[in-house]
Image (cartoon, grey):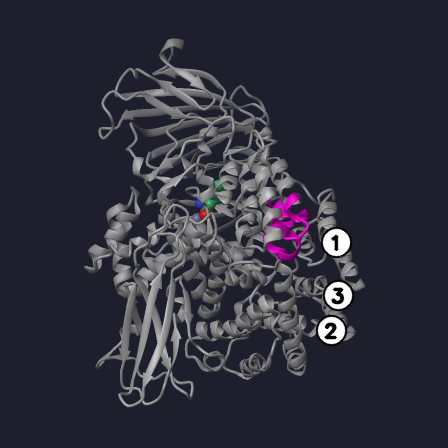
């Protein structure tokens, strides 16, 4: 809690419509490194739905007011009050008038990267969620929609490129200001202030074009730093494929003459969907086979699609208030996941999405920062751009589709677009579109948006041989979460199959009715299902395709899981069964020091590897063991990260040793032929080969290390080079430093590649890593001002190095707390995200728990914290 100002808790229940609307905004921005002048002419209009006689209250954030006029006449000092954070007109002159506001900004001093700031000398903006108020006074809330016209003026030398939302109307030299030029952009689509954007700088344009389904031409531009044009090809290709996909799958066409993307190197998040002018973290634009891994390519494709898809889900239909954030984010994540699933392998995409969901969202949901997909209160909205809002929000849309079927889902989406285009909408609007389109009552489903916590399904089965029936007893519980002790049962679409002794699916009949689409609906605390017509005891394959974001606890034996891992017709559950066997072993080993018996796992692995029908990418996902944090989350309490690390390492070694011959053959068979190709099938082969390399090096035999070093040296692409370096980095051998140094020397001029170098070092599970990380913070390659560098080094140490962040002596916690405090003065958003790495502290064993708590308390008790950091610290300790 900040000591200076007790920050307000903002509640969904207190929502009131805006008192004043802004019909048009005319911005005139004269760019200057330290004295940018902004004139905003707002056509204000009293909202008929507002309070009679309400004053005009506009938000600001650190603003310097220069001049204020109404219809051209300067305002008397007595008729308004202005502070850096608020402009009030207690007695507005009319119900409809033009207010002109001039403010003076210093973009160079803006280290928060919100509002107007500079990145590598270029000017850019970030306004979501509340950055526009750092540019001018405004009713900075998403339910005020206005038509924007933006004139930008700048030195032609300094900023030859001037961009804003919408279409370009005019440009040219500024008369009587030699060296200055201007551009006027007009966006015909009313939008909230958070979608405003402006860019000025020395940028190179990669141009292309697209013709929409109805024949409208669109100019596409990707703007990058000069010299990086060749690195934008994959992003452009992804953009065009996204545009086509949204037409084909959702019937959504693009709606302006131009679509521009700008890549910047200083950015708080991944990217931003500003209308017609997306701004990207350059890590999600720039790629070449030599500098980007297959994972990076997939990330670019996904984020480009995500931001493009926001044009309909977020921009054309926006959010009424920030509580509705999942309305645009969950839905848009769902859409980008589906796009990538269509472009690549659907099961492999699902597996990697669920891995992310469990690692990030299940962890969040099980700790002090748990909150509903639609929160009902916040102090700092920036702290709610979370895995729960994004990833769990996407799962809710996916469940809707499962419950309503493909056609019902599409009908609901169509109705949503039809009824709410041009509006600022709510989750209720979204759900009622589906209810109306399909006739289904979704009031119980709505609980998914209200109740936090990952539901648990306890499932047990009983086979009756004489009746040929199988009874499945299911109980559902939703655990208590902060502020929510009692929960109601939710509706859970549980996709399932009954697998016979030979591994084939048996009939799935309830009474004499086949189960439609293989999905039963759980909607009570306790339920039983009686399946009929079964001539042998089945093994249930539950939550196929991860149809619901729940934890399933079943009474499956290891033998049952082996059957599923080797023959389930649902690929996700083959993956899940294999992971389940490993997880049980790792838990037992970490908790009780139980010995690992790998026979069942290695024979399942053997059969997976031999299965010619399986995609290499699928094999790679399935055979990569559950992460240490997943084991910790499953253990739930008294967690000792060292014991988990040892258990996982031992299992990895045992599998690597048992399957040595197969991995050796695999490594040879999958050797690259011909040049590098970025497609999904080639990427899958590389993934499996790199997995084999890592298993073969696991006991650090001279052979295994030499093979990795050779791959590191001869690779012609980053995927292979980086995988080899990652393998080497996990072993305390001289080749580790040798390769790290060579990598640095080769790529020192490419900051995005240097992030990979920082990341690997931050992850090393060795006691000297903390000193190494501290040392790297003073390296020329590092900068506390750049979010990508901070995330790569300190973020990865805190979130991705369980043994060293959680050092028993508390030094890891102290270090991260120090960085949080240092960073908070510069960039509170990045600082508060870093602090969220403490979120599982209560699950630790007592010594570490006490050390983590005292570091958290030290942060919480520091004077002058940002609201962002204070909020995370307070909630983490509550
Ligand atoms: N709307 C962006 C997205 O998901 C998120 C975002 C980008 C953001 N930059 C931000 C959120 C800065 C908060 C602050 O696509
Ligand atoms: Zn988004």
Q: Which mark is residue 713?
A: 3
Please tell me whether the stretch drawn in magenta is mainly helix, strand or loop: helix
Element at badge 1? loop
Is disc 3 in contact with disc 1, using a CB cutoff of under 8 Å?
Answer: no
Magenta stretch contains residue 811: yes
User: Could you tell me residue 640's position as x and y percent?
Assistant: 61, 59
**Badge 3 or badge 1: first in the primary sequence:** 3
Q: Counting other residues with Cα less than 10 Å from the Cα at mark 2, is it few (<14), some (14-19), or many (20 or more)?
A: many
Q: Counting other residues with Cα less than 10 Å from the Cα at mark 1, is it few (<14), some (14-19), or many (20 or more)?
A: few
Element at badge 2? helix
Is disc 2 in contact with disc 3, using a CB cutoff of under 8 Å?
Answer: no
- In the rendered image, which quarter is residue 726 located in? bottom right
Mark 2–mark 3 distance (CA, rounded to whole Å): 14 Å
Q: Relative to 535, does residue 773 appear above or below in the rendering?
A: above
**Badge 1 or badge 2: first in the primary sequence:** 2
User: Could you tell me residue 268's position as x and y percent?
Assistant: 54, 42
Q: Which mark is residue 768?
A: 1
- In the rendered image, which quarter is residue 414 located in? bottom left
Q: Which residue is mark 2?
A: 704
User: Does the rendering let one see residue 578?
Assistant: yes
Give the magenta part as a residue range.
Answer: 787-814
User: Does the rendering let one see residue 265?
Assistant: no
- Residue depicted at 31% across the width and 24% down the height: 44
* Mark in front: 2 vs 3: 2
């Amino acid at each position: 809690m900040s000591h200076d100002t007790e920050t307000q808790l903002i509640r969904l229940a207190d929502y009131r419509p805006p008192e004043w609307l802004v019909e048009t905004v005319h911005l005139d921005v004269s760019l200057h490194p330290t004295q940018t002048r902004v004139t905003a002419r707002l056509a204000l209009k009293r909202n008929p739905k507002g309070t009679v006689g309400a004053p005009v209250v506009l938000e600001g954030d650190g603003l310097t007011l220069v001049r204020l006029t109404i219809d051209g006449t300067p305002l008397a000092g007595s008729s308004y009050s202005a502070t850096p954070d608020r402009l009030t007109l207690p007695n507005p002159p009319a119900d409809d008038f033009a207010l002109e506001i001039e403010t003076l900004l210093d973009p160079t001093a803006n280290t928060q990267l919100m509002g107007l700031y500079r990145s590598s000398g270029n000017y850019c903006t970030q306004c979501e969620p509340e950055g526009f108020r750092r540019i001018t006074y405004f009713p900075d809330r998403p339910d005020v929609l206005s038509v924007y016209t933006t004139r930008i003026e700048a030195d032609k030398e300094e900023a030859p490129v001037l961009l804003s939302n919408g279409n370009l109307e005019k440009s040219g030299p500024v008369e009587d200001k030699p060296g200055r030029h201007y551009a006027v952009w007009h966006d015909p689509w009313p939008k909230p202030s958070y979608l405003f954007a402006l860019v000025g700088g020395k940028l190179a344009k990669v141009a292309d074009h697209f013709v929409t389904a109805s024949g409208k031409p669109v100019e596409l531009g990707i703007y990058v730093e000069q010299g990086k044009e060749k690195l934008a090809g994959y992003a452009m290709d992804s953009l065009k494929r996204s545009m086509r996909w949204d037409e084909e799958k959702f019937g959504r066409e693009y709606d302006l003459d131009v679509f521009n993307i700008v890549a910047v190197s200083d950015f708080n998040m991944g990217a931003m969907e500003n209308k017609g002018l997306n701004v990207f973290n350059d890590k999600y634009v720039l790629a070449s086979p030599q500098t980007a891994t297959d994972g990076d390519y997939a990330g670019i494709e996904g984020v480009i699609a995500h931001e493009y898809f926001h044009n309909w889900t977020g921009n054309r239909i926006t959010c009424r208030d920030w509580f509705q954030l999942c309305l645009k984010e969950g839905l848009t994540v769902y859409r980008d996941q589906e796009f990538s699933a269509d472009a690549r392998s659907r099961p492999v995409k699902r597996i990697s999405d669920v891995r992310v969901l469990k690692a990030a969202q299940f962890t969040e949901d099980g700790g002090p920062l748990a909150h509903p997909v639609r929160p009902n209160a916040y102090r700092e909205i920036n702290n709610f751009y979370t895995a729960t809002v994004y990833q769990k929000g996407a799962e809710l849309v996916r469940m809707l589709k499962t419950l309503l079927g493909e056609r019902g889902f599409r009908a609901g989406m169509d109705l949503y677009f039809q009824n709410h285009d041009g509006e600022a909408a709510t989750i209720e609007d979204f759900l009622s579109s589906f209810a109306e389109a399909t006739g289904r009552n979704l009031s119980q489903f709505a609980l998914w948006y209200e109740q936090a916590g990952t539901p648990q399904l306890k499932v047990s089965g009983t086979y009756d041989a004489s009746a040929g029936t199988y009874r499945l007893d299911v109980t559902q519980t939703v655990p208590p979460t902060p502020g929510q002790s009692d929960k109601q049962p939710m509706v859970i679409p549980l996709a399932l199959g009954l697998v016979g002794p030979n591994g084939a699916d048996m009939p799935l009949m309830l009474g004499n009715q086949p189960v439609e689409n293989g999905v039963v609906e759980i909607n009570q605390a306790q339920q039983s299902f009686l399946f009929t017509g079964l001539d042998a005891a089945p093994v249930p394959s539950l939550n196929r395709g991860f149809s619901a974001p729940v934890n399933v606890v079943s009474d499956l034996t290891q033998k049952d899981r082996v059957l599923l891992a080797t023959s389930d017709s649902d690929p996700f559950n083959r993956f899940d069964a294999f992971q389940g066997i490993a997880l049980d072993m790792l838990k037992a080993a970490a908790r009780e020091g139980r010995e690992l018996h790998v026979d069942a796992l290695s024979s399942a692995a053997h059969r997976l590897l031999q299965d010619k029908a399986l995609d290499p990418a699928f094999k790679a996902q399935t055979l990569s063991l559950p992460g240490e944090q997943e084991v910790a989350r499953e253990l739930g309490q008294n967690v000792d990260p060292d014991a988990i690390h040892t258990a996982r390492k031992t299992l990895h070694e045992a599998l690597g040793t048992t399957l040595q011959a197969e991995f050796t053959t695999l490594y040879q068979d999958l050797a690259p032929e011909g040049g590098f190709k970025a497609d999904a099938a080639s990427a899958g082969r590389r993934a499996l080969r790199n997995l084999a390399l890592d298993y073969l090096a696991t006991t650090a035999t001279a052979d295994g290390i030499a093979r990795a070093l050779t791959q590191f040296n001869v690779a012609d692409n980053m995927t292979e080079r980086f995988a080899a370096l990652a393998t080497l980095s996990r072993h305390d051998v001289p080749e580790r430093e040798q390769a790290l140094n060579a990598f640095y020397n080769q790529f020192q001029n490419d900051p995005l590649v240097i992030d990979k170098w920082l990341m690997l070092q931050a992850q090393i599970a060795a006691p000297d890593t903390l000193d190494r990380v501290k040392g790297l913070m003073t390296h020329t390659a590092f900068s506390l001002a750049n979010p990508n560098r901070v995330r790569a080094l300190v973020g990865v140490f805190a979130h991705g190095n369980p043994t060293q962040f959680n050092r028993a002596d508390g030094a890891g916690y102290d270090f991260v707390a120090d960085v949080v405090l240092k960073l908070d003065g510069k960039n509170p958003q990045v600082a508060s995200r870093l602090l969220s790495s403490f979120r599982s502290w209560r699950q630790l064993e007592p010594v570490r728990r006490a050390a983590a708590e005292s570091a958290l308390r030290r942060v919480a008790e520091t004077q002058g914290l940002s609201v962002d950091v204070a909020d995370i610290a307070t909630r983490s300790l509550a």
